[in-house]
Amino acid sequence: MTSELQHYELRCRECSKSWGNQPRSICDDCFSPLEVFFDYDAVRSTFTRERIAQGPASMWRYSDLLPLPHGYRPTVPAGFTPLLEAPRLAERLGAKHLYLKNDAVCQPSLSFKDRVVAVALSQARSFGFETVSCSSTGIWPTRYRPKPRGTVSRP
């Protein structure tokens, strides 16, 4: 579902230097973090409500706004967890409407990190990485292990 052209690049948060799309997280010039910068004007004409609705029941329906490699085809239906209305909490907080994201049903590992990991792994594969690592404050490393085809599974 990814469009023909990539409409994003990495840019330095401080000096605004463009680094294109490469496996790096820090600017070599000023040592500041890099952030994904999107060219929203480039996707505005094709990224419509109708096109979103036609997409799969997963986060991949928003692939035009995700930093994915050219031609990426998802294999794991990550994300698309439900929003639950919380009217009593909304009333208590003085809000008209309040919704809570239920990530307890997020696939494949029942963690909110699944969405981020799915995008990160797609890029890692496109860069030719065979091994990835991640620091974690919890059980993330025990929840993910690669399958032979490079997808992610739960233990």
Image (tube, rainbow, N blue to C red):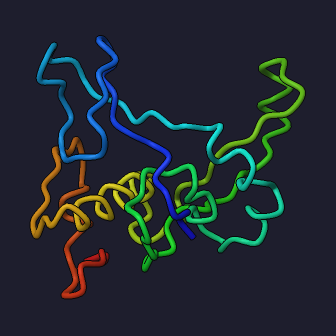
Above-or-below relation of 79 to 135: below
Q: Is residue 18 left or right of residue 102?
A: left
User: x%, y% of residue 62?
Assistant: 61, 57
Residue for point 77% across, 31% down: 89
Picture layout, residue 90 above or below residue 153: above
Pick whichever, 96 or 148, lies toward us: 148
Q: Which quadrant of the view contains residue 8?
A: top left
Residue 120 picture location, percent across and down: 31, 55
Locate residue 46, reporting x and y percent.
72, 56
* Residue 27 as seen in the image, left or right of residue 10: left
Quadrant of image for the C terminus: bottom left
Question: Residue at position x 29%, y 12% from top?
Answer: 15
Camera-side residue of 33 and 97: 33
Whether 38 is drawn above or below 6: the answer is: above
Residue for point 31% across, 12% down: 14
Near-viewer residue (4 or 117) = 4
The correct choice, above or below, for 77 with respect to 17 in the image is below
